[in-house]
Amino acid sequence: MTTQIGNPFPMFYDLRGRPLDRGSVYIGAVGQDPETSPIDVFADVGLTDKIAQPIRTIGGLMSRDGNAVFAFIADQQYSIRVKDADGATVFYAASANIGAANFQPASDDLDAIAALTTTTFGRQLLTQASATALRAYANIPDALPLTGGTVTGSIKRSTGGGYAYAANPAIHEVRFYFTEAGADDPRTQVGDVWFEEQAP
């Protein structure tokens, strides 16, 4: 796989379009002044490494201890104010969410699922293109239609006994008739079986 390299860090510029040096970035609650209503900002997506505010910039990049730093928050939206080295506001946004959709919030459930031990068979089930392909991969036989269909073995009913199985492939249905002695022959098709009561 080919991957293009790019700058993973956001760039900040001063009012003249130059990379902002010795600037200050404030992150706060959405709709509020981030300087007076700051929220926690972290250097890692797991939200464990907290960054002090304001976040200073070096050459247009947010930094900590002289090194470029990522910035993550727990909320989906935030307010932001950026100032230059003289304290003049470069820009302010009461609501921003740039890049919020790029990261999956931490989830104990997702972590537990990711930690499960899986098998090749189980993973392959998820890659089948259709229900037909899934049945073929898992060796699941097709269900009989509601009418018609072919059965090659004996059928046992869950209640009331069993169905008869005809060894002759030309016989598709077996019917049993029990009559009194002297009754008319009820058979009308191949596969009918007639039991007539013996006369006294």
Image: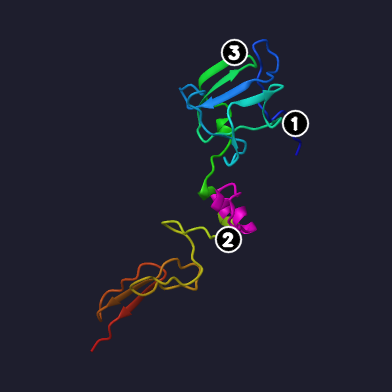
Please report the bounds of the magenta region as a residue range. 111-134
Q: Quadrant of the C terminus?
A: bottom left
Q: Residue 51's spot in the image, x, y percent?
A: 60, 34
How many residues crowd around disc 1 within 10 Å: few (fewer than 14), some, or many (20 or more)? few
Which of 88/200 is in front? 88
Could you tell me which residue is drawn at 56 percent across and 56 percent down? 135
Amino acid type indicated by mark 3: Ala
> What residue is pinned by disc 1?
5
**Front tag of 3 and 1:** 3
31 displayed left or right of 88: left
Q: What is the spatial separation of the Cα atoms under label 3 and label 2, in whole angstroms?
A: 70 Å
Residue 45, image x, y percentages: 60, 39
Reply above or below: 101 against 13.
below
Q: Determine which of the numbered discs, if any, sits on residue 139 in the image.
A: 2
- First reached walking from the N terminus: tag 3 or tag 2: 3
Q: Secondary structure at mark 2?
A: loop
Q: Nearer the viewer, mark 1 or mark 2?
A: 1
Residue 129 locus on image (x, y percent): 59, 47
Q: How many numbered discs?
A: 3
Q: Which residue is mark 3?
A: 88
* Observer-nearest of 141 and 146: 141
